[in-house]
Image: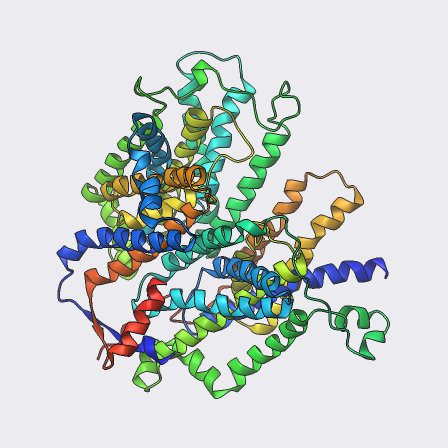
Amino acid sequence: MQPDFSIRLEKRGSSSSFYEFFSPVLALLLMLIVGGLLFALMGHNPFKALYIYFVEPLIDVWSLHELAIKAAPLILIATGLCICFRSGNWNIGAEGQFVMGGITGAAVPIFFPDFTGFWVLPSMLVCGIAGGMAWASIPAFLKNKFGTNEILTSLMLVYVAGLFLDWLARGPFRNPEGNNFPGSISFTEWQVLPEVLASGRMHYGMVFAVIGVLLVWFLLAKTMKGFEISVIGQAPRAGRFAGFSTKQTTLFVFLMSGAFAGLAGISEVSGAIQQLRTTISPGYGFTAIIVAFLGRLNPLGIFAAGIVLALSYLGGEAAQISLNVTDKIANVFQGLLMFFVLACDTLIHHRIRFGHSWGFAKKGITHGAG
Amino acid sequence: MGLVEAILLTIFTAATPLLIAALGELVTERSGVLNLGVEGMMIMGAVSGFAFAIYTGNAYIGALAAIIVGMLFSLLFAFLTISLVTNQVATGLALTILGLGLSGLWGEGFVGIPGVKLEPIIVPFLSDIPFFGKLFFQQDIIFYFSIILLIGVGWFLFKSRIGLILRAVGDSHASAHALGLSVVKTRYLAVMFGGACSGLAGAHLSLVYTTQWIENMTAGRGWIALALVVFASWRPNRVLLGAYLFGTVGIAQLHIQALGVNIPTQLLTALPYIATIVVLVIISRNRRLTMMNTPASLGKGFVPDR
């Protein structure tokens, strides 16, 4: 056990602007290396496997559309989460808020299947946003009122939301003419989020993501509220002296991130799936946490990070088909990436010094990479 | 075997992994490190325990492998949060995501294959006691171990010198460092202890509870174990109470279903999660109790200023 202790961190005078840009790139490279090793271990040619995983999905116009479809919810959720994380509130339950948004939004066409008109979609979106906000307000309320740990409550609500969806899709919301198959009625023209371009399936969810990113960038960089959020996150005591209310901020950031997750949920249900099923997310709410960190809690960075992580899903599907490995490989890449991002970020503020004995220090590094 | 015995036995089986994982996390948190990766370490323990039991045909080797794998996996977390001082919440989440992915990859070939069961050890004479014999002395080794662990952790934290050091590190890493105690070494060991416990808890799921491999078979138990530590306000004895309480809630759904009561199964499955929230609220209402026992440095990174 001795080896690991010989790594020392030395604080830099100022944060390194080189690593500030380079650390996500370094993290991506490290992920590719370890991912390649993993493929080799499983008996695949690592170069070919990585090509299938990370390059092939980018070649067709068709798959670029699929990439955008997967990136949109990730970017939307992560954009909301970065507000939360910046204020030091840990909303880990975006997955549940996403599901709730999908449910409440889909309730409109399920209860009123005959409604037609331009206002059907907006009302679905509003209901979706409201559903996400309502679900996110629970951990915020419990934290403000009783001091309950928001990490655990928001996470527990993910399971509850998932089971609620399962019950609805098999019970009250089931299509009566669906031969007892779970799942709601399929949405029709006025209830489906339209496609943006004629060349593929990409729907307006991506447009929402772009607008959301710009709005939140403005909120965080240019407004007093954004400043308040950052101060409370970094120096809560200073924030209190400045007269900022911690509780108000907690509620605000949870509602915001809930709204974004809810919007992502109904966009996914209305645009991509076009009905309510027993599951509507391959873990977007959790992956979005990685997106937020890879994007360094900055909306513009999150946009780029969302596309990278969407590629991890798409590549996972490609690998499942071409290489016959489970799509769980996507989770492996995502987890590895998050580790490397966090590790590389240390370089921004610290210089790493190795201890007296190189042998020991080297061994310490292997642990981190393995 | 009577109905009461049967029900109690299932509760014991459901509570044991929660108890072990929560005790491990309790020690980790007492040293000032918040490891949210319990779920990930548990699922790695579950898959490696299952795998090595099948490779060798011996469930004990499986359980041992789960302990080692859990420990190695936690080392990853320790290296990042302690040596590189990364954000503990984010790193713990990464550990969980990675664990779910890796276990799915490793366990792909095990789906649908019958596993090796960790057979109960029947204690001579004591197991013949009516009622109690069946409950306490005809169990698997992990159950016996969980009780020993409970007593051991309680003694270690509050009666031993190293336990005192561990708590000092968790309450004020700066003071502990100034006294010449090794914050880094203590935390590494505490995190690895937590990893070992989570690994074993996972093995209990795949070697005793179900004896098969199912993807995501931990189903949030790691997170419930984390909640148990808060519930117990960082006291080992209260973890015992919490684990058996939650074991009961988790098992209740099966028995209610068996009774044929017309409640949606999804609602019954959601009960442990809802119960967790309710219990957390009740506990956190009493702020003094929580404040008094929470390790003061919990979740804060430590960079020595030398």
**Quadrant holding the N terminus of chain B:** bottom right
Residue at image point 63% right, 31% down: A170
Number of marks present in the image shown: 0
Q: Is residue A97 left or right of residue B63?
A: left
Q: Is residue A47 left or right of residue A218?
A: right
Quadrant of the drawing holding the C terminus of chain B:
bottom left
Q: Nearer the viewer, residue A290 or A51?
A: A51
Give how far across and how far down residue B23 sits, in percent.
Answer: 55, 70
Q: Compared with residue B238, is residue B124 higher up or lower down, i.e. above or below?
A: below
* Camera-nearest residue between A106 and A44: A44
Where is residue A99? Give x, y as percent: 48, 37
Residue at image coords 37%, 59%: B91
Q: Quadrant of residue B131?
A: bottom right
**Is any atom of residue A209 visible in this view?**
yes
Q: Is residue A83 above or below residue A242?
A: above
- Residue drawn where x is 72% and y is 67% of the image: B119
What kind of colouring is applied to the model shown? rainbow
Snapshot quadrant of residue B79: bottom left
Instruction: Give the answer, above or below, for where B27 lies relative to A171.
Output: below
User: Relative to residue A297, is residue B170 depicted above or below?
Assistant: below
Across and down, in percent, residue B69 comes to 49, 66
Residue appearing at x 58%, y 62% in the figure: B55
Which of these two is toward me, B234 or B67? B67
Residue B285 in sight:
no
Residue B203, image x and y in percent?
A: 59, 63
Residue A157 vs residue A2, the one in the foreground: A2
